Image (cartoon, rainbow, N blue to C red):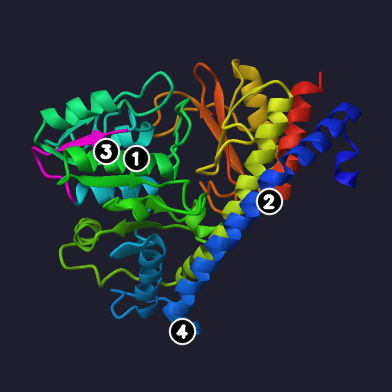
Amino acid sequence: MTQWLQKFPQELQDKVAKVEKKIQPQLDKIDQQVLNNQARVLDAFRKFHVAEEDLVGSTGYGYDDVGRDKLENIYADYFKTEAALVRPQLASGTHAITTSLMGQLRPGDQLLYLTGMPYDTIQQVIGIAGNNTNTMKEWGIDFDYVPLTDHGKVDYEEAQAKLAANDNIKIVAIQRSRGYASRNSFTVAEIKDMITFVRRIRPEVIIFIDNCYGEFSEAEEATFYGADIMAGSLFKNAGAGFAKTGAYIVGKKQLVENAANRLLMPGGRDEGATYYHMRDFFEGFFMAPHTTGQAIKGMIFTSALLEEMGMNVSPKWNEPRTDVVQAVTFGKRDPMIKFCQTIQHYSPLNSFVAPIPSTMDNYADEVIMASGAFTEGSTIELSSDGPLREPYSLYIQGGLSTEHVKIAITNAVNEIFYQK
């Protein structure tokens, strides 16, 4: 038995040992996936001749930024798309999603979410929650969504009716991750089926993928199967803990160009300084397959141990993984808060802080959040958060190393189940 476990009750030590043995074949599968994804990333770096001078970045207007061009070529190559926009000026995944959508949508168009109601921050962007200005609603852009079935799957019958009934549908959006919903995140195989379905009924619509938390989580991406445009954050999987800010958009050339015009200005894609960022962006993308694999293995351990303790977890430890998020349902407010606080206490930064429920911008309910990360808001680093509402589900994500996840989660389990 390793030293770090010896402080825990013998029963918990035995459970951890049992879990580690049980999940090993699943971890071996993740290692193979990481190896394959790493090979593809390395091939892209070699293809575009990345050199030391590409890591310097640009200043001022950002003209003639050769490193930025190479990085965007690498993203487009990896995701098998025509073009990419990878910029520090994109402040978050939500910003990249908004930029992608608003680059295409015009007054009178409709945005249809195929995967149920989008999560809280996107609701603010649309204008169906909060009191923000400059929302899609304010610009005369219509919104609708297809409610999911009771099993958390796409209701294809309802979707077909909505797609056939409204000629103004311009974009069909697919949210890969669960957000704060109880459903499972959608696998690439499921998204492939969604894309095929939409193309059969409305081949002309733009299919957009919210890929946050999903990059490198599987051997394939949704853009391999005909998604038109996709976006995600660099301080989630794609930045591997190196990127301090930024996000990406990949897809068809004209759609990415439209998004660039929205972000910068018409004709301004060649602008946007990258000073201080390029080394982190390049190194982050190179390390992303490995780091994402570490996070997924940590979430497999988390799922297995919490299930061993009798808790309701999603996904289960042996189910397919398509992102770095693990949901666990507490059913009560206090143990959820205590668990989250323990994760904070076993973080590298601000371990002495005890997070408390509070209101946050763009969220309807009080939220509890643990995030002792080197980059603020990073969710490829171990964190946990959730709204304080029924059924009191906490969403655990990330982990730069599997070892850190094991230590933090085991301590949290100890606090909840063994400390009186």
Secondary structure beneath disc 1?
helix
For label 3, count other residues whose C-alpha is less than 10 Å away and answer few (under 14), some (14-19) or many (20+): some
Secondary structure beneath disc 2?
helix
Q: Is residue 260 magenta?
A: no
Instruction: Report x, y in % for residue 16.
Output: 80, 35
Q: Amino acid at mark 4?
A: Glu
Look at 23% across and 34% down and name the residue there. Answer: 112
Instruction: Report x, y in % for residue 351.
Output: 70, 42
Give, as a single range, the part of the protein colored magenta: 104-114
Looking at this view, is 289 or 268 the one in front? 289
Q: Are marks 3 and 1 in contact (CB under 8 Å)?
A: yes
Residue topped by disc 1: 193
Residue topped by disc 2: 28
Q: Is residue 109 magenta?
A: yes
Q: Which mark is residue 53?
A: 4
* Label 3, label 1: how far apart the Cα atoms are: 6 Å
In this rendering, position of residue 170 left or right of residue 330: left
Q: Amino acid at mark 3?
A: Phe
Q: Quadrant of residue 18?
A: top right
Q: Earlier in the sequence, mark 4 or mark 2?
A: 2
Q: Earlier in the sequence, mark 3 or mark 4?
A: 4
Looking at this view, is 23 or 216 the one in front? 23
Q: Earlier in the sequence, mark 3 or mark 2?
A: 2
